[in-house]
Image (spheres, rainbow, N blue to C red):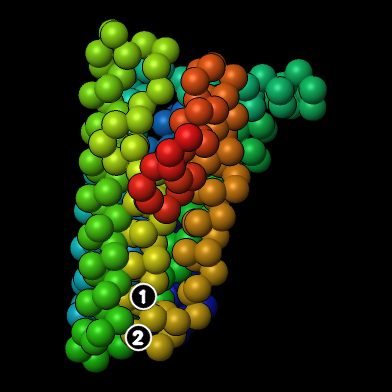
Amino acid sequence: MPPLVPFLAVNAAVSAVAFIALWLISLRLKDVSFIDVWWGVGMALIAWTALLQAGPTPHGLLLVGLCTVWALRLGGYLFWRWRKNGPDRRYVTMMAHAESERKWSFAVASLLLVFALQYVLQFVIALPVQLGHGSPAPLGPLAFVGTAIAAVGIVFETVGDSQLAAFKAKPENNGKVMDQGLWRYTRHPNYFGDACVWWGLYLIAAGTGLGAWTLPAPVLMTFLLTKWSGVPTVEGRMRRKRPDYEAYVQRTSGFVPWFPKKV
């Protein structure tokens, strides 16, 4: 493992270059929605940068492999959704508010509210796939448990996103609440799967010693999904647009999958 500070500095610099390039692209498009595509792909970039610096180890290779699979699946899905649906209403509202209320230009608002913020969050959450490269020791019980949890997470969010896309593609479901498949057991199978992935990656990293100190990463990811940009955003919009969503809330688990309640 290289000296820690230069090691992290290189990772941060590579990520910063990517974010600056994407910010410049957003100025040309006048749209920042595609940044969601980079959320996972950028973490994979950081993981690969860490691997190239630290050299291959059992834990490092496992972390990079799982992170890459997760990132490509999520990034591909979000790219498809962005190209299909156009600018995300959340970002459109955010930019409009910043320009009208704060009198910020699009360039300043997009840099401060979107790209700089996500740069910091992404780097912190990616700590397990950075600091989990340090030990040449063979994989242990934590790594096997973490791999299982991460794999379940990838499958869970993949199936959840696929079921939702298929549901929305049918005209007869317009205006209805998706309560089938995995969505019958949790209102957010995609977010639950995401959380599982990062708790799994943390457990793999924790087996290396230094990686055990990256606990803030999965905690932050879970907080973002359940309390900030994930669940609250979706549920606020659904309550406004779907009259029968409240009944769905009453019978369906909010995050962790469980059997529906009888209401």
Using the rendered view, name the quadrant where residue 200 is placed: bottom left
Displayed quadrant of residue 186: top left
Q: Is residue 196 left or right of residue 166?
A: right
Residue at screen point 20% across, 89% down = 138
Residue depth check, mark 1 versus mark 2: number of the one nearer the observer: 1
First along the sequence among labels 1 and 2: 1
Q: Amino acid at mark 1?
A: Leu
The answer to whether residue 202 is above or below residue 70 is below
Horizontally, is 171 left or right of 13 in the view?
Answer: left
* Residue at numbered disc 2: 208
Residue 82 pos. (x, y %): 37, 25
Task: Using residue 153 as the reference point, say whether residue 96 is left or right of it.
Answer: right
Q: Is residue 134 left or right of residue 109?
A: left
Q: Considering the numbered disc 2 on the image, is that residue within a helix, a strand or a loop?
A: loop
Q: Amino acid at mark 2?
A: Thr
Q: Residue at x 48, y 74 (%)?
A: 214
Is residue 77 at all visible to an observer of this figure?
Answer: no
Q: x%, y% of residue 141? A: 25, 84
Q: Residue 174: which numbered mark, if any?
A: none
Which residue was labeled with disc 1?
203
Residue 83 location, x and y as percent?
A: 32, 21
Q: CA distance from mark 1 to mark 2?
A: 9 Å
Instruction: Please give the name of the residue rendered at 54% of the width and 69% of the height, measured from the top-left corner.
Output: 216
